[in-house]
Image (tube, rainbow, N blue to C red):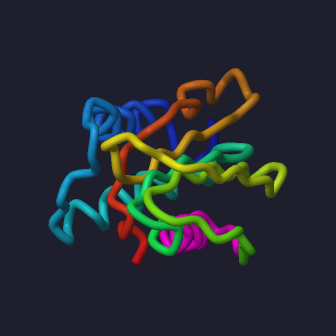
Amino acid sequence: MTDAVDAAEIQAIRKRLVPLSLLKTAPELDSETAIALRQDLSVLNQLSDYQTLGICADSLGEGQTALEKFLGGLGVTVALDLPEREGPVYIKFNTLKGAWYLDDYSGTTRGVLVTFHIDDAALSEVNGTYGPFPLNLFG
């Protein structure tokens, strides 16, 4: 455990984030809730080794913007040159490898899933997938 974050804080963060996993589409958030979610994600991000993001959006432009904003919010700068695509899309991005995957998407879910990965057994509670978060959570 780090000095700044203890097991109780990680549990509290998980308790706030896990209910989002029951949703099909990202909820509308008031500004206070959005700030709190960004803070929770930031804490888990700082503790994790790397992250994967999954984005379901109505268009490539919307998905790519959400990906770049989320990555920026997590401290990763990237400019992706994704191939043109019409209609709803699914984008997956792995921060460890800097690798991405893009495909058409026919489902109804919209939003961003964030998975935190950590090998440290003492911090295994950090591991998990959270969301969907609104595409514009980070701007």
In this view, 15 is above or below 83: above
Place of residue 83 in the rendered image (x, y in percent of width and height, measured from the top left) = 70, 68
In this view, 4 is above or below 125: below
Place of residue 52 in the rendered image (x, y in percent of width and height, measured from the top left) = 64, 45
Q: Residue at x 31, y 67 (%)?
A: 35
Check the picture and name the quadrant holding the C terminus: bottom left
Place of residue 93 in the rendered image (x, y in percent of width and height, measured from the top left) = 67, 52
Can residue 9 be found in the magenta stretch? no
* 3 left or right of 36 in image: right
Q: Residue at x 60, y 40 (%)?
A: 116
Location of residue 98 (image quadrant): bottom right
Location of residue 117 (image quadrant): top right
Q: How many numbered dots are placed on residues in this image? A: 0
Q: Residue at x 74, y 74 (%)?
A: 81
Residue 4 appears in view: no
In this view, 45 is above or below 129: below
Place of residue 40 in the rendered image (x, y in percent of width and height, measured from the top left) = 41, 52
Q: Residue at x 62, y 25 (%)?
A: 124
Residue 15 appears in view: yes
* 2 left or right of 95 in image: left
Query: Between residues 114 and 92, which one lies in front from this camera angle?
Result: 92
Can residue 68 be found in the magenta stretch? yes
Chief secondary structure of the magenta portion:
helix
* 29 left or right of 16 in image: left
Magenta stretch, residue numbers: 64-77
Query: Between residues 95 and 106, which one lies in front from this camera angle?
Result: 106
